[in-house]
């Protein structure tokens, strides 16, 4: 028992180290997980890590976070998995919450935010790169291309957060017609434990009802923020970059809790931090609660982050128990093509929507295009680019 507790402590310490050193998003995170969890500690094999990561990529929620919590689940069950989640997300969530508080304080003080003028078009360039890379990776057929284009058009013109689950559902249904192209695998009987799925669904329904009941009470905005982020966290396929169009539509276009410039500034800053991109939710939550003072901003940041991270955790705990059996069904694998293509279209639409409020001049176009090219054709880390944009803003 003592040896097991020591091993759990070492595992959580490793997760803590990753939480403050893992820059660069899910792809870079996977490389660091491979180095720390496989080569250094031998918590699992390389093939097991890659398979876990692939599973998390096709579930709603943050890919890196789900991968780490799934490893924790395999090592020490649900208790260790929840501690893993807490250790992994805490640094980035606290930083983004405090950033939101500081951002609002400086705005109220009349501070000049002109130094962020370069990182806002840079953020659009970063989202554009995400759209390009996702499309290159997941769109491999004419049908996939059509789905991506339709998804982009609908996401651009329909300004409501409720359109996203419909897009994902119908996109997945559209590609199931090609299920016969998937290789046949021998099926085994699935043993399903429904507890975490019922927990996920119960929180989803309860928070939706509670959010509706408290809709007219401004002081209970944290409840509605939790519902908003929990709903989005239950519907985001593809990780942090797909988060952007959903949150922009919900909190900028639909609810007007943030301006487009604030949204872009926060997104740029989260790109320069280690840990999960989903910590961006804390920044949005803090600014959404600014009318209730600093304590309200802190509550808003923490509640929003919990709401966004929790559904993906419930779902990975649910699916991981029978994933080996589920992935053998061709119709399941076929539906993923449509879901991924639709996600790529959403990110492409988000890049255009985020670009619209920016100044229409040659500098904006040059910075956006330059950021895109630097990320595509060089190995310059995103955090270094963002830092360079901030320094240039101060100097010029």
Image (cartoon, rainbow, N blue to C red):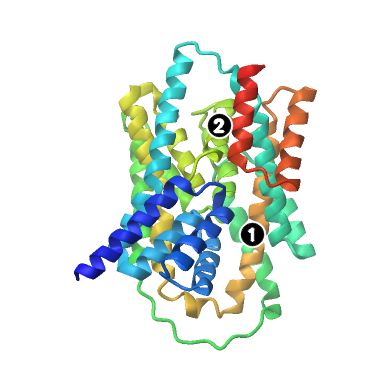
Quadrant where the image shows the C terminus: top right
The image shows residue 133, relative to residue 279, as above or below, that is: below
Q: Is residue 324 visible?
A: yes
Element assignment for label 1: helix
Q: Residue at x 34, y 22 (%)?
A: 293
Q: Residue at x 47, y 47 (%)?
A: 21
At which x and y percent is residue 34? 51, 63
Residue situated in front as seen by the camera: 252 or 53 = 53
Residue 204 visible in rendering: no
As drawn, the residue found furthest toward the top would be 110
Q: Tell me if mark 1 has few (under 14), some (14-19) or many (20+) residues whose alpha carbon lies within 10 angstroms of its own.
A: many
Q: Which residue is mark 1?
A: 340
For residue 237, side relative to residue 192 (left or right): right
> 368 or 256, which is in the foreground?
368
Quadrant location of the N terminus? bottom left
Nearer the N terminus, badge 1 or badge 2? 2
Q: Residue at x 42, y 18 (%)?
A: 105
Query: Image quarter for residue 153?
Result: top right
Image location of residue 269, percent across then percent down: 54, 34
Disc 1 to disc 2, C-alpha distance: 25 Å
Numbered badge on residue 263:
2
- Would residue 361 be found to the left or right of residue 242 on screen? right
Q: What residue do we see at 44% from left, 42% from top? A: 228
Mark 2: secondary structure: helix
Query: Which residue, as the protein is rendered here, is positioned at the far front?
Result: 40
């Amino acid at each position: 028992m003592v040896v097991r507790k020591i091993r759990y402590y070492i595992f959580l310490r490793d997760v803590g180290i990753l939480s403050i050193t893992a820059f660069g998003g899910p792809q870079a995170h996977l490389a660091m997980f491979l180095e720390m969890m496989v080569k250094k500690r031998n918590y699992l094999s390389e093939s097991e890590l890659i398979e876990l990561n692939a599973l998390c990529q096709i579930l709603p929620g943050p890919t890196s976070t789900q991968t780490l919590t799934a490893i924790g689940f395999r090592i020490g069950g649900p208790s260790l998995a929840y501690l893993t989640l807490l250790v992994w997300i805490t640094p980035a969530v606290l930083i983004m919450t405090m950033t939101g508080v500081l951002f609002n304080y400086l705005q109220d003080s009349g501070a000049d935010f002109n130094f962020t003028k370069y990182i806002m078009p840079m953020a659009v360039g970063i989202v554009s790169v995400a759209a390009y890379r996702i499309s290159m990776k997941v769109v491999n057929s004419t049908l996939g291309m059509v789905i991506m284009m339709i998804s982009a058009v609908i996401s651009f013109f329909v300004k409501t957060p409720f359109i996203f689950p419909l897009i994902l559902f119908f996109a997945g249904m559209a590609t199931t017609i090609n299920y016969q192209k998937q290789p046949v695998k021998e099926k085994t009987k699935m043993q399903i434990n429904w507890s975490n799925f019922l927990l996920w669904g119960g929180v989803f329904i309860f928070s939706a009802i509670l959010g509706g009941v408290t809709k007219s009470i401004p002081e209970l905005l944290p409840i509605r923020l939790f519902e908003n982020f929990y709903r989005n966290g239950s519907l985001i396929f593809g990780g942090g970059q797909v988060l952007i169009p959903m949150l922009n539509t919900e909190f900028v276009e639909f609810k007007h809790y943030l301006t487009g410039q604030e949204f872009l500034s926060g997104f740029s800053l989260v790109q320069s931090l280690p840990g999960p991109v989903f910590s961006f939710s804390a920044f949005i939550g803090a600014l959404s609660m600014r009318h209730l003072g600093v304590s309200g901003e802190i509550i808003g940041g923490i509640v929003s982050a919990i709401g966004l991270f929790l559904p993906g955790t419930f779902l990975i705990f649910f699916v991981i128990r029978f994933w080996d059996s589920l992935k053998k069904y061709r119709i399941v694998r076929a539906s993923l093509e449509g879901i991924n293509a639709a996600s790529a279209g959403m990110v492409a639409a988000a890049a255009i929507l985020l670009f619209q409020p920016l100044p229409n001049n040659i500098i904006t176009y040059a910075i956006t295009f330059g950021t895109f090219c630097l990320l595509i054709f060089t190995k310059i880390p995103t955090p270094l680019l963002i830092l360079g944009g901030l320094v240039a803003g101060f100097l010029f």
